[in-house]
Image: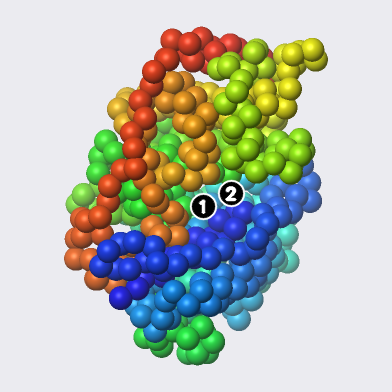
Amino acid sequence: MLLLGIDIGTSFIKVAAVDAATQQIVATAQCPDSENPITSLQSGWAEQSPEMWWEQTLQAIEKLIATKNIDAKDIRAIGISYQMHGLVLVDKDQKVLRDSIIWCDSRAVEIGEQAFKEIGEESCSSCLLNSPGNFTASKLAWVKKNEPEIFSKIDKIMLPGDFIAMKLTGEITTTSSALSEGILWDFKKDQISEEVMENFGFENTLIPKVQNLFSSHGKILPELAQRLGLNENVQVTYKAGDQPNNALSLNVLQPGEVAANAGTSGVIYAVTDQLFADKFSRVNSFVHVNHTTDEKRIGVLLCINGAAIMNSWVKKVCGDNLSYKEMDAMAAEVPAGSDGLFILPFGNGSERMLQNKIVGAHISDIDLNKHTKAHIYRAVQEGIAFAFRYGLDIMRENDLHPTIIRAGKANLFLSDVFIESFVNATGVAVELYENDGSAGAALGAGVGAGIYKFYSDAYTQFKPLGKFGPTNVELYDGLYQQWKKLLELHLK
């Protein structure tokens, strides 16, 4: 019995077939071969085509099946993980009305800040657990204000995962978790936020049917089942944002457990049973995948927009066609601190942990007689690790004190230099696992389909690859303090 997981990332669409019994990946595929573009019509804007995601999803599934490692008829359920906070708009015929305004787009900051004042700080903190900020609801308000003709044609608004599920099944649903990441959910009343809807002048009919995250979100369309060779009774039984899904894939489900991810963006995601809100909305609280009215599970998310995307930029600009592994090897030859070279990685839109300021990326204190490309390769990874430390200190201010962080051996956590920088800068040990967003989505599908009766049934083979603890905290703390002073200069 197989489970199919789909991960709608910013750079790629990844799919995985997982054996339900062993919980092991038996086949994977991704599309495209190179990273997807982000359209930026103005500075601070970021858009992608939902139809591009869909075409690449189909291509990735077809590539997966073409590996001959699996029989498509053995797939019993489909799960979807997706880039969070994106806005997808469709008309009554389920046609996309405009490109998606994605997670790192900054155009709605002022609209969200105005809504924060109008709704009231106390109400936002206690009911929404966040400022409307630069999230999905504020992006929709931007469309209403600036593109009224498009707004008038909207039948339903969706998150990216809702859209892919719609394309697979023809049905449109959403979840409390998805709505919470759009700042459209009232945590106290466990319902769509009346205050947000009224403040922005949105009709409730714009919101799809809300149902349990682990449930049937529709049966695959017959024509797709025939095209892909799937059983016609296959259903989408799970969909979650990429960071809650990453936590699920790492068995981070209970209060006190913490996950991290160092992909395009950098994330620390902690689970609590408290309705938690940072007074400056620098870290954000969302409905976790296993949240219920009786057993609250809130995911507290620190997001750094500029993480591995900074490493990717350096590779493109001065990587000399090196692989990331080769860049890491060169970086490892440079001493900790990169001989005084510091990098701020914040070049991917407004940063929530910096109160939505657009700081930009900076390379500082270059010594033309000393510094080489290898120094840049190391300084980038150290700068990203220091950004994690800055955000983790905000979580500590809010009485969240992780003692160990789980992460998948992927993206920057493939680099020994980054792992060394991360654990020493934060002072927190890391456990690495063989995990993947698409594999996590597949396991989620197994829970949603009832193949796993309990969450624990999905983790019977869950074992760490290794544990890495801090060994030189004092040195890295001194380097971090220098880096922090540089950041504070740019925040003034």
Q: Residues within 10 Å of mark 1 (few under 14, many from 20)?
A: many
Q: Do the residues labelled 1 and 2 touch (CB within 8 Å)?
A: yes
Q: Earlier in the sequence, mark 1 or mark 2?
A: 1
Residue at x 58% of width, y 17% of height: 335
Q: Can residue 156 be seen in this view?
A: no
Residue pictured at 51% horizontal, 52% vertical: 84
Depth check, front residue: 415 or 124: 415
Gap in angstroms between the C-alphas marked 1 and 2: 6 Å
Closer-to-camera residue (267/322):
322
x, y (%) of residue 382?
56, 25
Q: What residue type is labelled 1?
A: Met
Q: Where is residue 285 in the image (x, y as percent from the top left)?
A: 40, 41
Residue 234 position in % (x across, y down): 38, 81
| Quarter that holds the C terminus | top right
Q: What kind of residue is marked 2?
A: Trp
Question: Which residue is under mark 2?
Answer: 103
Image coords of residue 200 (percent x, y): 56, 52
Q: Residue 84 carries which label?
A: 1
Secondary element type, mark 2? loop
